[in-house]
Image: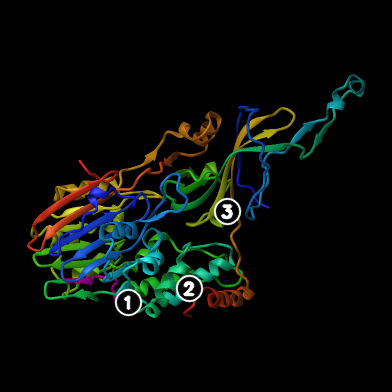
Amino acid sequence: MTCFPDEILSPPDENQLEITLFGPNYGESLVLHIPTIGWGVIDCCKFKIPGKNSPLNLPLEYLKGILSPKLPKLSFIILTHPHEDHYNGIDELITEYPGGVKRVCWYAGNGIPELKKYIAINRVAGKDVLPGYVNVLNTIEESPKRGVQLRRLSELTKIAETDLSSLIALSPSAYNEKKYIEKLLKSFPIAGKKVAQLKDNDLNIISVALFLKCGKFQAVFGSDLQNLDGPNGGWNAIVANHDCPELWANVVKVAHHGSSNGYNEGVWKEHCKKNKPIALIAPFNRKKYLPEKSVLTLLKQNIDEIYISSGPTLSTKLSKYYKKDVVTNIKYRTRNFRIIEPLDKVGFVRLRYLTDGTLVEKKVLPPAIKLP
Amino acid sequence: MNSMFLEKIGSSDSNSPNFPVSFPMTINTRSDTQDIEYDDTSLSPFNLAKNEPKIQITTKHWETIKEWWMGTVTNINYDEKYFTAHLRDLKFVESIAEFDFDSVFENDNIISEYLCEGAEFAFFVYIRHGYGFPETISKIEFSTPYIWKDSDNEKAEKLIKQLFSNV
């Protein structure tokens, strides 16, 4: 029994490629089946069903549902960057997936000691930055004890490769790694000064974007990679890299939930060079709402199909939650106040292809939707 | 002690839950209005003969919280002078709110001292009781930034070893 309907839990054929995107309001995870490589997961997220106590680990639930009873070893688990909406539950996935894991890959090892120090400094200052990440780091670093191979990712690192298929990291560039460590070091306080936190975007600098090739099929998974100043940073570094493969794609997981700083015109020109890719977006419904309308407008100029793993759930119906005099005060005090309506169920977008690039299945489980 | 502004909107509700005002984190507070309570006895016929009502400045009033959110600043727009925050109430209902600087801070000095991405604050709507009250009020109080001490370096180093298995 999983949180997904039984009738959609049939596995793909051995020679079929599968890309399934989960993104319940807050959180993003991709489950992949790559012919000749096997099953793998990029990032992890959880979802709390109303009325149930513990949140469900979505890729774990899905894999158990679709592959039981004979769960194969996962070929890879990838952590793209240290943001809660991408790492939440990845420790659980590593330790609790019944079939075991061959390889755990994570963003470049540079900056890990600095990040540990950053977490400790903030704990001393009474602030739990990156909740749950201590356990994630410990689980990943201890995973070789379970027979798991650890691999650090940076530009053009191979994750898995066969004659038919290959999965490689496109980032972070050396420049991004340097910038990321600079941000961490700069955040370390000196005596007499206040303890400051990193900005959310600072942690995206280290993001691992990924490129998948399988026969005549190609996909790019943008993680939360953003544009960074100059030709050596962010998406520009990927476009400028002479060794980078051609980035035309059948499927693109839109970078950084469809934010304007994750959108790079040059990269999208590359994606659309051969055909119009299908775009997948996991929304971000926490600190602000993503995708941005301006980005959707730009995407629609180039592509026909955009799928989002859950619809917008921001509501201005304050009276549903608060009494009249409280609503009056909220409206008086704020210039804008929107409730993040909780989802009552979780959906996904699933695409299955043959290795010649033919789309054979397109499954959109609500609240996932195709954008009009 | 520092104030984060106080706003009033007159309305009353006698059915509100009776939560004590307390804070789970260190928050410096001060009301920017003086609390003036008229002493009832001073208005009695006996005292009227003394020609002037007695006015006392006192802190005698009490507050009952109607709603309470913990907020984290997520974005600051200095050009348009507002900030965006993620809020969570006691029932875990989450919201995204935008606050104008001038609806929260009294002056620019306070902005530079308290406002930064990741800064935490409490936003609450409460009823203020007392003579001439009740009225419903909202208030925002930012947590005091932690000032790093030399001795904290050692604590942080120890903590790294405690938290992480691979240092």
Q: Is B71 left, or right, of A16 in this rendering?
A: right
**Looking at the picture, which amino acid does disc 1 mark?**
Arg
Most distant residue in the top direction: B45
Using residue B40 as the reference point, say whether residue A59 is left or right of it. left
Disc marking residue B109 = 3
Where disc 1 sits, the SS reads strand
Q: Give the percent coordinates (x, y) of residue A238.
A: 22, 69
**Relative to residue A65, is residue B162 depicted above or below?**
below
Q: Is residue A176 left or right of residue B82?
A: left
Marker count (numbered) = 3
Query: Which residue is more in the foreground, A285 or B139?
Result: A285
Have a look at marks 2 and 1 and say if they share a chain.
Answer: yes
CA–CA distance between discs 2 and 1?
17 Å
Q: Report the chain holding disc 3.
A: B
Label 1 – label 3 distance at C-alpha:
45 Å
| Colour scheme in use | rainbow
Q: Which residues are magenta?
A: A166-175
What secondary structure is found at the residue carrying circle 2?
A: helix
**Dot 1, how many residues are within 10 Å of its Cα: few (below 14), some (14-19), or many (20+)?**
some
In the picture shown, does residue A99 fall above or below B20?
below
Q: What type is the residue that disc 2 sits on?
A: Lys
Does residue A89 appear in the picture of this structure? yes
Which numbered mark, 1 or 3, is in the foreground of this view?
1
The residue under label 1 is A152
**In the rendered structure, the residue with mark 1 lies on which chain?**
A
From the image, tell me which residue sits under label 2: A116
- The three-letter amino acid code for the residue at tag 3 is Asn
x 35%, y 61%: residue: A44
Q: Are marks 2 and 3 on the same chain?
A: no
Q: Are marks 1 and 3 on the same chain?
A: no
- Asked whether residue A308 appears in the rendered view, the answer is no
Q: Position of residue A140 (x, y in %)?
A: 40, 73
